[in-house]
Image: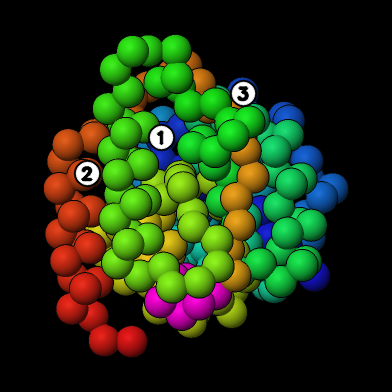
Amino acid sequence: MRISLCLMVWNELEGCKLDVPHLPRGAFDELYAVDGGSTDGTLEYLSAQGIPVHRQPKRGLNAAYVHANEVSTCDAVVVFFPKGSTPPEDLIKFRPLLEQGVALVVASRQIAGSRNEEDERWLRPRKWMVGALALLAAALWQREGYRVRDVLHGFKGFSRAAFTEMDVLDHGLSVDIEMVARAYKLRLPRAEFPTSEQARPHGETHFKMWPTGKKLLAYLWFELRRHG
């Protein structure tokens, strides 16, 4: 199986400097980035590292995934966000599962052996929200197979054919939970492996918890009424 590695970036210069030198480039058949409109030198840094950068033609997280799947020339795509919070070494864990025929593979912060950045706190609102959304999505659509626990992690791999079959929306930011919901509805094979997450050392998240949570609930309502 030929597998692309896609870096998802939007003003992530400092994160790229931390992660790009440690990418296992030899484990992939193709390497490129999809950029959401960086102005901080991210594009120049990646180009200097020999990494082609594709400007996404439409804004938004979903649109970035759609473009990543379109520009790949391989059979599968692994998506990685270089922000210094997840280990690039875990990138080598995707190939064995994808080559076994798993359509959606998630690097999980929610299963045994994993670490979530909130694990050392007493209050873990983001982790609990992910767990609640995972249970809700499974209750609504899982009828067989593996139940995905980390439905909001962008660190994932998927076959391009499965992504096309999922018919992911090309707007909004629902793509992570949407891919899980669509995989349930289409009965596509899915799996997770544990990864570790630390607080990002530079900058702030692009996805604040409460505004994002409300948008994801709106997506789930849409998916309930979606045909197919």
| Amino acid found under the numbered disc labelled 1 | Asn
Q: Is residue 148 above or below residue 13?
A: below
Q: Which residue is mark 3?
A: 18
From the top left corner, tell me how far across and down residue 224 is, in percent. Answer: 21, 73
From the top left corner, tell me how far across and down residue 3 is, in percent. Answer: 73, 63
Disc 2 secondary structure class: helix
Q: Residues within 10 Å of mark 2 (few under 14, many from 20)?
A: some
Disc 1 secondary structure class: loop
| In-front residue for pair 19/224 | 224
Q: In 3D space, how far apart are the residues under numbered discs 2 and 3 (Cα atoms)?
A: 27 Å
Seen in the image, is 149 located left or right of residue 79? left
| Amino acid found under the numbered disc labelled 2 | Thr
Q: In 3D space, how far apart are the residues under numbered discs 1 and 2 (Cα atoms)?
A: 19 Å
Q: Earlier in the sequence, mark 1 or mark 2?
A: 1
Q: Which residue is mark 1?
A: 11
What residue range appears in magenta? Answer: 183-188
Q: Which residue is mark 2?
A: 212
Question: Of circles 2 and 3, which is in front?
Answer: 2
Q: Is residue 69 above or below residue 147?
A: below
Seen in the image, is 67 located left or right of residue 173? right
Q: Main secondary structure of the magenta part?
A: helix
